[in-house]
Amino acid sequence: MSTFHLVNHPLITHKLTIMRQIETSSKDFRDLLDEISMLMGFEITRDLPLEDVEIETPICKTTAKRISGKKLAIVPILRAGLGMVDGLLRLVPVARIGHIGLYRDPETHEPVEYYCKMPPDIENRLVILVDPMLATGGSASDAITKLKERGCHNIVMMCLVAAPEGVARLQKDHPDVNIYSAALDEKLNEHCYIVPGLGDAGDRLFGTK
Ligand code: PRP
Ligand code: URA
């Protein structure tokens, strides 16, 4: 069974509260998602392995630590996942970026794929899959299946708001993928939107409603 990490640092929780509010503008929504993504990145990268390196300071030679060869890839689920990329990139500027385009069919709520482009060596990388909303879990589950088909075996999921239904679905479909979220909300409504949630993340991010 994978683990569910609630990343509820007060700064993150405060910023998320502003994002949830209906009157928050697209610009502020975008800026806050970017800030939260960077803050969550600290938690996600906490266990990156370190290795010794011999260096020389202005005072003496010494053995210090640096992140060992582990390579990262950030994979946003389009569209809304795009809003989480830059915050992570500021922490790990050399990470490669893959893209998976999925939208939820408004009737069936099932994900429909329309785009997929990955770095060629994605299978050798720790993949951070990002999407602000984990609702039914269908989109994230399909995206992880696609990544596994390409040989990825080291994947974590980072979202902003999760529903219990989405967490259960991911843990059932992909018990090897740990989940990081800034909030675990109450439930889904009849349209499979997260309650209380923040509405349609893509529309709020890009001002398309
Ligand atoms: C939203 C969201 C997730 C998905 C979550 O995307 O960004 O990708 O829904 O729902 P699920 O867990 O039930 O699959 P949407 O389909 O609205 O596409 P968009 O980002 O292009 O607006
Ligand atoms: N997608 C969103 O953007 N919001 C939700 O609440 C559920 C799916």
Image (spheres, rainbow, N blue to C red):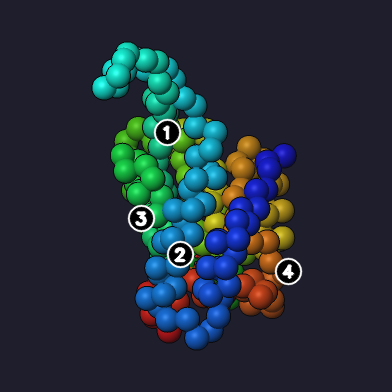
Q: Earlier in the sequence, mark 4 or mark 1?
A: 1
What secondary structure is marked by label 3?
A: helix
| Real-space CA distance between mark 1 and mark 3, rounded to the nearest whole angstrom | 18 Å
Q: Which dot, 3 or 4, sits closer to the camera?
A: 3
Task: Specify whether 94 is left or right of 112.
Answer: left
Q: Earlier in the sequence, mark 2 or mark 4?
A: 2
What secondary structure is marked by label 1?
A: loop
Task: Specify whether 20 is left or right of 203.
Answer: right
| Real-space CA distance between mark 4 and mark 1, rounded to the nearest whole angstrom | 34 Å
Q: Earlier in the sequence, mark 3 or mark 4?
A: 3
Residue type marked 1:
Arg
Q: Residues within 10 Å of mark 3 (few under 14, many from 20)?
A: some
What secondary structure is marked by label 4?
A: loop
Residue type marked 4:
Glu
Which label sits on residue 125?
1
| Real-space CA distance between mark 2 and mark 4, rounded to the nearest whole angstrom | 21 Å
Task: Specify whether 108 is left or right of 79.
Answer: right
Q: Residue at x 44, y 53 (%)?
A: 38
Q: Name the residue carrying label 4.
A: 186
Q: Earlier in the sequence, mark 1 or mark 3?
A: 3
Q: Residue at x 54, y 45 (%)?
A: 43
Q: Work out whether 66 lies above or below 168.
A: above
Q: Work out whether 72 lies above or below 35.
A: above
Give x and y (percent) for residue 177.
Answer: 60, 41
Q: Are marks 1 and 3 in contact (CB under 8 Å)?
A: no
